Image (cartoon, grey):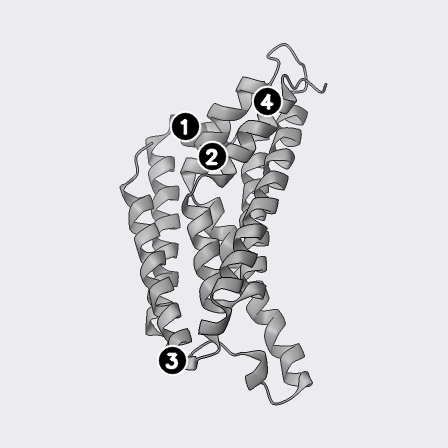
């Protein structure tokens, strides 16, 4: 079907790969624990959108550039690592806890303040995933194993597999966000502990950036 071979096997493999702890999982868990369920949800949307970006890159063959050019791989890696470190440093330098709904004086401020925060969290998730060259190389190595090489429209096959992978990833990551935010719900009610959670998140983000920086193609 659409040039895809052993689709069920692909779905099972995708689920196993998604539940394996990685940079995306740590990012979502950290966001959810430090900033709550809404932040976790928009982080999941951002990460999932990043997966779709990699799907399009793989489908159009642009990811081959990362695989064949050490310079391109290194450049993307440095951008992604620097951005994670930037987010971590920003959270470490922030001396105030994120604005909670209970701290907002009225609904009008809630309506104007929250969309901007949500968009930023989503945007950060997209950038974090998109500028991880390991994801692009993984797509190039993993997807072709389930595509019929004789199928004329391999781009369509890549897109369908990418959408399937993104769907399974979204479901799993959403579960992580809900569990992590629920686990830390009582902790975040204490402003002091909430600040500490954000500092820990900052350290984790910097650690993820350094980890990405040290990885090789």
Instruction: Looking at the picture, tell me which residue is in the foreground, 190 or 59.
Output: 190
Helix, strand, or loop for circle 2? helix
Task: Specify the quadrant of the image occupied by residue 70.
Answer: top left
State the residue position of label 1: 67
CA gap between label 4 and label 1 equals 25 Å
Percent coordinates x, y for residue 68 in the rendering: 39, 26
Q: Is residue 60 visible?
A: no
Helix, strand, or loop for circle 3? helix
User: Which is more foreground, mark 4 or mark 2?
Assistant: 4
Q: Residues within 10 Å of mark 3 (few under 14, many from 20)?
A: few
Q: From this view, report whether residue 188 is shown above or below residue 163.
A: below
Q: Is residue 16 visible?
A: yes
State the residue position of label 3: 192
Q: Quadrant of the N terminus?
A: top right
Q: Are marks 3 and 2 in contact (CB under 8 Å)?
A: no
Percent coordinates x, y for residue 85 in the rendering: 34, 58
State the residue position of label 2: 136
Instruction: Tell whether 25 sits left or right of 168.
Output: left
CA gap between label 3 and label 2 equals 39 Å
State the residue position of label 4: 9
User: Which is more foreground, mark 4 or mark 1?
Assistant: 4
User: Which is more foreground, mark 1 or mark 3?
Assistant: 3
Percent coordinates x, y for residue 141 in the rendering: 47, 24
CA gap between label 1 and label 3 equals 46 Å
Q: Are marks 4 and 1 in contact (CB under 8 Å)?
A: no
Q: Are marks 3 and 4 in contact (CB under 8 Å)?
A: no
Q: Are marks 1 and 3 in contact (CB under 8 Å)?
A: no
Q: Residues within 10 Å of mark 1 (few under 14, many from 20)?
A: some
Percent coordinates x, y for residue 91 in the rendering: 38, 69
Instruction: Looking at the picture, tell me which residue is in the foreground, 31 or 79.
Output: 31
């Amino acid at each position: 079907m659409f040039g895809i071979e052993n689709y069920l096997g692909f779905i099972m493999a995708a689920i196993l790969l998604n539940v394996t702890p990685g940079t995306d999982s740590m990012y979502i868990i950290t966001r959810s624990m430090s900033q709550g369920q809404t932040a976790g949800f928009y982080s999941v949307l951002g990460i999932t959108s990043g997966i779709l970006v990699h799907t399009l890159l793989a489908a159009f063959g642009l990811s081959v550039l990362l695989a064949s050019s050490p310079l391109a791989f290194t450049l993307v890696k440095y951008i992604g690592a620097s951005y994670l470190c930037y987010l971590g440093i920003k959270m470490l330098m922030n001396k105030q806890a994120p604005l909670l709904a209970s701290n907002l004086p009225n609904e009008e401020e809630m309506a104007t303040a929250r969309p901007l925060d949500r968009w930023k969290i989503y945007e950060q998730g997209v950038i974090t995933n998109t500028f991880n060259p390991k994801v692009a190389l993984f797509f190039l190595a993993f997807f072709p194993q389930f595509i019929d090489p004789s199928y004329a429209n391999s781009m369509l096959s890549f897109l369908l597999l990418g959408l399937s992978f993104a769907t399974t990833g979204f479901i799993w990551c959403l579960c992580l966000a809900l569990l992590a935010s629920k686990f830390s719900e009582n902790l975040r009610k204490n402003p002091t502990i909430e600040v500490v959670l954000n500092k820990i998140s900052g350290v984790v983000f910097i650690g993820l950036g350094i980890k990405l920086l040290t990885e090789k193609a």
